[in-house]
Amino acid sequence: MSASDGVSNTVLRFTVIALLAGSALALVGPSAPVAKAEVVWLCKPGEEPNPCRESLTTTVQAPDGSTRVEDPPLPAAPPIDTGPMQGKVCSDEREA
């Protein structure tokens, strides 16, 4: 038996082991569930209820521990649409 026969047998063994391991993993399948991308609007324009159009009342706590309540007015019309932007590709800066 020559040295090249030993190398060939070793390569063959590793190939068979790799194929068997790959087959076993394929039978088991993925262990984690596949993620699904569903668009869920938090503040969809024109939809009710719309948490972005509710009260903005906020309690502010100062460093000395005192608190005050602020109630800023809602804007008449939001300046921008903050809806989902996933999948939008823009090559022209004027479109952004």
Image (cartoon, rainbow, N blue to C red):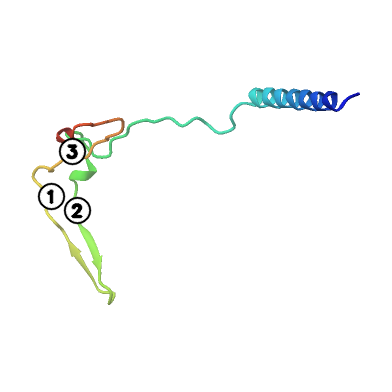
Q: Which quadrant of the view contains residue 61?
A: bottom left
Q: Nearer the viewer, residue 21 or 46?
A: 21
Tell me which label, 3 or 1, sits earlier in the chain.
1
Q: Residues within 10 Å of mark 1 (few under 14, many from 20)?
A: few
In the depicted structure, whether residue 2 falls above or below residue 56: above
Q: Position of residue 15 (x, y in %)?
A: 73, 24
Amino acid type at mark 2: Leu
Query: Residues under labels 3 and 2: Cα distance?
Result: 18 Å
Query: Residues under labels 3 and 1: Cα distance?
Result: 15 Å
Residue behind mark 2: 56
**Residue 52, label in figure:** none
- Asked if marks 2 and 1 touch (Cβ < 8 Å), the reply is yes
Q: Nearer the viewer, residue 2 or 53?
A: 2
Residue behind mark 1: 74
Tell me which label, 3 or 2, sits earlier in the chain.
2
Q: Residues within 10 Å of mark 3 (few under 14, many from 20)?
A: few
Amino acid type at mark 3: Asp
Q: Residue at x 27, y 31 (%)?
A: 88
